[in-house]
Image (spheres, grey):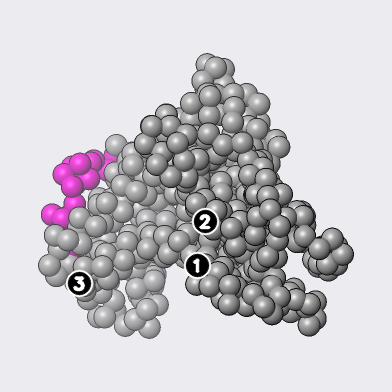
Amino acid sequence: MATKACILLVEDDETFRSFLQTILEDEGYVVRTAGDGREGERALARESFDLVVSDLKMPAKSGLELFRESRQDPGAPPFIFLTAFGTVDEAVAAMKEGAVDFLTKPLAAPESLLSLVARTIESQTRNRAFVSLKEAEAAGLPPEELVFAGQAMETVRQMVHDVAATTANVLICGESGTGKELIARTVHLLSPRKKAPFVALNCAAIPENLLESELFGHERGAFTGALQARQGKFELAAGGTVFLDEVGEMPLAVQAKLLRVIQERVFERVGGRREIRADVRIIAATNRDLQEEVMARRFREDLYYRLNVFPLQLPPLRERFDALPALVNFFLQRFCHQLNKKLPPVEPEVLRAMGAHHWPGNVRELQNVMERAVILAREKIGLEHLPESIISAPMEKHGGSKEVLRDVERDMIVKALERNRGNRRLTADELGISRRTLQYRLREYGLIDEA
């Protein structure tokens, strides 16, 4: 995590409290203190914590009461209790209600507390990352060499590796379907924050009146329908990365609140007063020209410069046709696996038809086309399994794509030969063409001598 955890220490014995504060701070933790349960309650109301270490029995308000009241907040921190031998039964009961653990006073050794604190905070980090990890696995994220397939992506690859290790905000620009979220996830996975959550929000998909709540959460009763408190994306991503897709669609009022988070690294839930630390990295993406949006006063200039620290421009699919075979093969394997089918690689004529298409929807459109083709195909994918818009696209329509497609076809044949260890019969079978056609192509592309 980018910063050390913040711990609230609630203990009425001043000497013992000072002792505990010293050993926790010596370990690098940020420690806030409270002398009893009521002070602890006020501290929880004004600040967010990663952990509460509390005495069980205290005047005014007990640690157990403080714990039970805190459970009403979905973002409540975990509790570790300190208790005398006479109240161990109460501490055990608190664990049944959700407390992490307890230690008896006096401490046998400071290491016992430090070990328990470290395990608890590490567990919290893993729990926060679990949903994000499962979402990534469910999405079937491709390997890095596929994300950056094509010569036009080489510069992007290098820039991603350069920026990942830093804390800089990143702005990813590109047409819809070019893989902006994949690049954002790659930056996150290459960064020191990779063990913490990656939390994505599509700003265009959330109604304006709910977007602030989605980002920052809300307290119970903050608005009609807010029946209970709720964490927002910035809380859920603690220590990790928030990905704001289609940030150009964000309303001006919410832009102002986002700017404050970037500048001051704190925010409040809707309807709340407690400041919550924003220990997150922000990666934003847009298919709009944000400079034009700034000039049209639809996007704040100060926010634009805060987000645009490190811009990444993604090329459209029509500028990376050399990646087509790899992308097609990936989607073929993915959907064959999902649909429990076994199909050979697509034929060169299918790739040629795909290469003549303009792909306005970019890689996302290609993914949809391949899913449809796999569903329709029985023994192999043919032209009849492609949409009419692709089959009818004339090769000449896109100028220089003929030469690119020759390279694509040549590359397919070379890789098929390598997989089959030079066996032309097996290669022809895999490509779905006759040996005579393969022989002709090998000569045409200079892969064998004329003799």
- Above or below residue 264? Residue 37 is below
Q: Residue at x 54, y 58 (%)?
A: 68
Q: Is residue 8 magenta?
A: no
x, y percent for residue 271: 53, 34
- Which amino acid type is marked by label 3? Lys
Q: Residue at x 43, y 64 (%)?
A: 134
Task: Tell me the residue that label 2 is attached to.
Answer: 71
Q: Is residue 216 left or right of residue 83?
A: left
Task: Tell me the residue that label 1 is attached to.
Answer: 97
x, y percent for residue 448: 38, 72
Quadrant (top left/top right/bottom left/bottom right) for the N terminus = bottom right
Task: Tell me the residue that label 3 is attached to.
Answer: 341
Find residue 125 and report its image quarter.
Answer: bottom right
- Which amino acid type is marked by label 2? Arg
Q: Is residue 202 left or right of residue 60?
A: left
**Looking at the image, do the residues carrying marks 3 and 1 touch, with CB atoms under 8 Å apart?**
no
Secondary structure beneath dot 1 equals loop
Find residue 326 and report its image quarter.
Answer: bottom left
**Looking at the image, do the residues carrying marks 2 and 1 touch, with CB atoms under 8 Å apart?**
yes
Q: Is residue 394 magenta?
A: yes
Q: Which residues are magenta?
A: 381-396
Which callout, 2 or 1, points at the residue further toward the start of the chain? 2
